[in-house]
Image: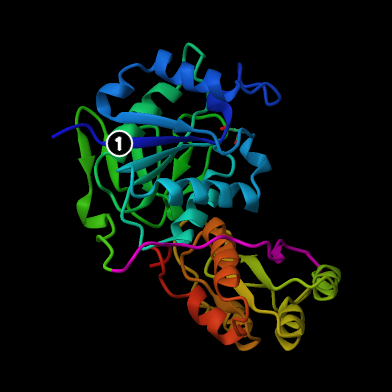
């Protein structure tokens, strides 16, 4: 059998920077040349082509960038067996989560990778990340993944946990999908089934989502009033552990009531990395639930935000109840 076709989609990040200097990105042609010069064995693994939808520090990632990458994938979906997206690590879990919703019934590997050190650096991690990602991209995995430090993660379960270590990512609430040691191992029982439906592509539109992170002593009144005035469409609350909120001094209950009475959906995710929101576990969660907040189980913050973008974009007139139902439903492996 011939080699698989893999499209490298370069979007920027440290991998293509000169000595990690944010304002000093290699030009697209230089990145392409560098990738092939520094990692020539990539072409033994697959038939490669490159494309450059953008060349940014991923801290600048915005909705149009995600739509550009989506268009690139849509236009090339039938031609290539897999896609490797070279991306900065800062917002990689957001973008991977977004694409897991935007490519509905995805049947091809879409693998995000990047590096902590630029490709041209002597101790770069870009080389191994590229090789592993291209190899995983030839393996028919029907998922949007992140491949980093020899581990394959489900993209919408992944969080960036380290600024300086090569093992920069974790998937605290879902097993890894594979690893690249002496052999490549796929954990097939954790990989999504091949979808039955037709693959479709959903562009994102900008929507205003409010975020409140709780901390002891926080008075939410002013933030909530500002959100109610500014046309926010939904609020994600990062609460404690199982979804608990303060109910005594600085009670957050009046804030939840004010938002839900104004028709604003309030979704609770956890500040904890591991485990699932369960609003029935403590009084501090029960009261949030009675005030109208919806606990979003074990979804990551990144997946919750991008899922809201996706749901608002796909169903512009979605009612609050329906939005709540869909937020806690597993759409793309993002929630247990
Ligand atoms: N700030 C960089 C970015 O996200 C960091 C990296 O590439 O790892 O683009």
Determine the residue positioned at 70% across, 73% down: 233
Q: Is residue 93 visible?
A: no
Image quadrant in which the C terminus is located? bottom left
The image quarter in which residue 291 lies: bottom right
* Image height of 49 relative to 229, above or below: above
Q: Left or right of 4: which side holds 271?
A: right
Q: Say if the magenta span includes residue 103.
A: no
Find numbered disc 1 in the image and state the secondary structure of the residue it sits on.
strand
Query: Could you tell me residue 308's position as x and y percent?
Result: 58, 67
Q: Ligand 1 quadrant?
A: top right
The boundaries of the magenta stretch are 197-219
Residue 178 vertical position relative to residue 99 in the rendered view, above or below: above
Image check: 143 left or right of 69? left
**254 vs 41: above or below:** below
Q: In the rendering, at what x and y percent does residue 112 appear?
A: 44, 41
Residue positioned most to the top: 122
The residue that disc 1 covers is: 5
Describe residue 11's horizontal placement relative to residue 154 as left or right. Answer: right
């Amino acid at each position: 059998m011939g080699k698989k076709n893999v499209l490298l989609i370069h979007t920027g990040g440290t991998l293509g920077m000169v000595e990690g200097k944010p304002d000093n990105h290699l030009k697209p042609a230089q990145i392409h040349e560098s990738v092939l010069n520094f990692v020539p064995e990539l072409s033994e693994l697959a038939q490669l082509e490159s494309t450059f939808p953008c060349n940014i520090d991923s801290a600048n990632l915005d909705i149009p960038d995600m739509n550009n990458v989506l268009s690139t994938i849509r236009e090339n979906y039938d031609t290539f067996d897999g896609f490797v997206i070279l991306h900065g690590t800062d917002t990689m879990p957001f973008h991977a989560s977004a694409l897991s919703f935007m490519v509905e019934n995805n049947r091809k590997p879409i693998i995000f990778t990047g590096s902590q050190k630029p490709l041209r650096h002597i101790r770069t991690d870009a080389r191994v990340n590229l090789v592993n990602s291209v190899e995983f991209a030839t393996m028919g995995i029907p998922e949007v993944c992140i491949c980093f430090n020899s581990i394959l993660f489900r993209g919408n379960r992944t969080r960036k946990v380290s600024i300086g270590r090569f093992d920069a990512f974790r998937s605290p609430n879902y097993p890894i999908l594979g690893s690249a040691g002496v052999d490549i191992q796929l954990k097939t029982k954790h990989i999504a089934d091949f979808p039955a439906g037709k693959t479709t592509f959903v562009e994102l539109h900008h929507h205003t989502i409010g975020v409140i992170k709780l901390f002891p002593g926080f008075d939410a009144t002013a933030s909530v009033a500002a959100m109610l005035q500014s046309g926010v469409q939904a609020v994600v609350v990062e609460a404690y552990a199982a979804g608990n909120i303060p109910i005594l001094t600085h009670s957050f209950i009046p804030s939840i009531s004010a938002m839900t009475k104004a028709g604003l959906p309030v979704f609770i995710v956890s500040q904890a990395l591991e485990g699932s929101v369960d609003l029935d576990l403590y009084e501090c969660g029960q009261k949030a639930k009675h005030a109208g907040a919806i606990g979003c189980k074990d979804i990551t913050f990144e997946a919750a935000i991008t899922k809201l973008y996706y749901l608002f974009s796909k169903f512009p007139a979605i009612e609050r109840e329906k939005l709540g139902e869909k937020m806690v439903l597993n759409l793309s492996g993002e929630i247990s």
